[in-house]
Amino acid sequence: MRMLEDELFPSTPGKVKIERAHAINRQFHRCFASTSTMFLWALFLIALTASYLSFQSFVDTSSKYLSASWGGLHWEKQIRVSAEVRRAHGISVLVTGAAGFVGSHVSIALHKRGDGVVGLDNFNSYYDPSLKKARKSLLASHGIFVVEGDINDGRLLSKLFDVVPFTHVMHLAAQAGVRYAIENPASYVHSNIAGLVTLLEACKAADPQPAVVWASSSSVYGLNEKVPFSESDRTDRPASLYAATKKSGEEITHTYNHIYGLSITGLRFFTVYGPWGRPDMAYFSFTRNILQGKPITIYRGKDRVDLARDFTYIDDIVKGCLGSLDTAEKSTGSGGKKRRPAQYRIYNLGNTSPVTVPTLVSILERYLKVKAKRNVVEMPGNGDVPFTHANISLARAELGYKPTTNLETGLKKFVKWYLHYYGYRPRGSKNL
Ligand SMILES: NC(=O)c1ccc[n+]([C@@H]2O[C@H](COP(=O)([O-])OP(=O)(O)OC[C@H]3O[C@@H](n4cnc5c(N)ncnc54)[C@H](O)[C@@H]3O)[C@@H](O)[C@H]2O)c1
């Protein structure tokens, strides 16, 4: 200390020196005090930031919870009422993708015959969500409740199975469309792979386990050239990511059937069309463009061959879905283990009479009474296949599936719906 003072005050001894020493002491203490104040302030700021961050995360979590569109007593009641079976030996079905084209039709058909139906749909914007909302309103007018949620939400799914012991799941939710995979491949993985697994996990864990009927696709036949396409044909050459995810779905469902005893029926739909259809499909967008006087793009295959599709009317597909639900055996698992082998089936649901795309356009021109501005181009390599043609003998024998609507009749009904839905005054409507 002495040494320190000497160094600090080397000149005169006495009072001054002492006073100066006091002054420096005070300065030292002030300095020390201000350092500790700064330190305290720093601590205070750190604590404030930490509590702000944890408050933020609390707010985030709770707002997620609060903004979730499901849960609560009223919600559960709506589900129970919608799932009520109103006929002897009826079934209660969770329909995923219920606000979609096929899902809305299947839901109404099940409800009409007295089965219990609860829908689930995430109302994504792959195509105009207002059409999905309109389908939801249509279902609501029949007394069918559609839950707004994602099949990737495992908590929601297990809640649904807690509220209702569904006997069947009709799984139609998916990222559909072949070309969109170039733009947004992740959406196919999200819904068709991850979502499927989450759904199957919920089905596996449910007690009782439901029987699962789900939509695969004719696109799994990929680059095959042998026609008509049969269920036993190879399906290992998909031409699009969509097809690849549907093929994966067939393998994934097989695994859940094998390990957990889930009863599985996969349906390979062939180009489904009709009222309340999907705006991304050719017959729909052609209709829109023809009516608006815009050109339509018609793809042509190798060597100028016209593309052809086995167009299948929605009512026939619905009958195939109901036939599958009615013939599905019970799942055989419980507590995550199968007790004995369970049913695993795959069926083509098509129309067995392919029609070329130019013929489809001619039929539309006739019903719309407008000439199309055709723009014929080579088919780009974006996932489309040149033709589809279903062999439906297996579905006929085992599901009693028998399509009855040809493209002429089906398109007439579609055009009638389209004009009404989009507010066109039909020209010469007596012809429709
Ligand atoms: N329409 C056809 O020609 C056709 C042909 C072959 C296969 N399929 C298959 O049939 C099923 C139904 O097709 P569609 O024509 O009715 O299609 P769609 O797009 O009209 O219906 C699917 C519905 O599923 C919903 N959905 C998508 N991802 C979801 C998710 N992660 N969680 C919850 N909901 C989700 C969508 O919002 C949509 O309403 C699909 O699996 C499709 O791949 C359809």
Image (tube, grey):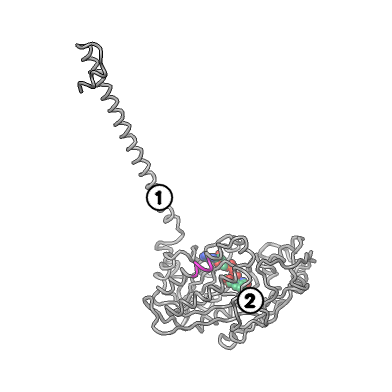
Secondary element at image label 2: loop
- What is the x, y in percent for residue 63? 43, 52
- What is the x, y in percent for residue 328? 49, 82
Position above or below: 181 against 23: below
- Looking at mark 2, is its residue's CB closer than 8 Å to ligand 1? yes
Q: What residue did someone put label 2 on?
A: 270
Give residue 309's quadrant in the image: bottom right
Give residue 349's quadrant in the image: bottom right
Position of 221 with respect to 15 (left or right) is: right
Categorize mark 2 by other alpha carbons within 10 Å: few (<14), some (14-19), many (20+): many
Q: Earlier in the sequence, mark 1 or mark 2?
A: 1
- At horizontal 43% and vertical 84% (from top left) the residue drawn is 341
Residue 103 appears in the picture as rendered? no
Specify the quadrant that holds the N terminus: top left
Can residue 399 be found in the magenta stretch? no
Residue nearest the viewer, comparing 369 with 352 = 352
- At horizontal 40% and vertical 73% (from top left) the residue drawn is 205
Q: What residue did someone put label 1 on?
A: 57
What's the magenta region?
191-196
Give residue 348's quadrant in the image: bottom right
Q: Give yes or no for contact between labels 1 and 2 (Cβ–Cβ under 8 Å).
A: no
Categorize mark 1 by other alpha carbons within 10 Å: few (<14), some (14-19), many (20+): few
- At horizontal 42% and vertical 56% (from top left) the residue drawn is 65
Three-letter amino acid code at the position of disc 2: Phe
Position above or below: 57 against 305: above
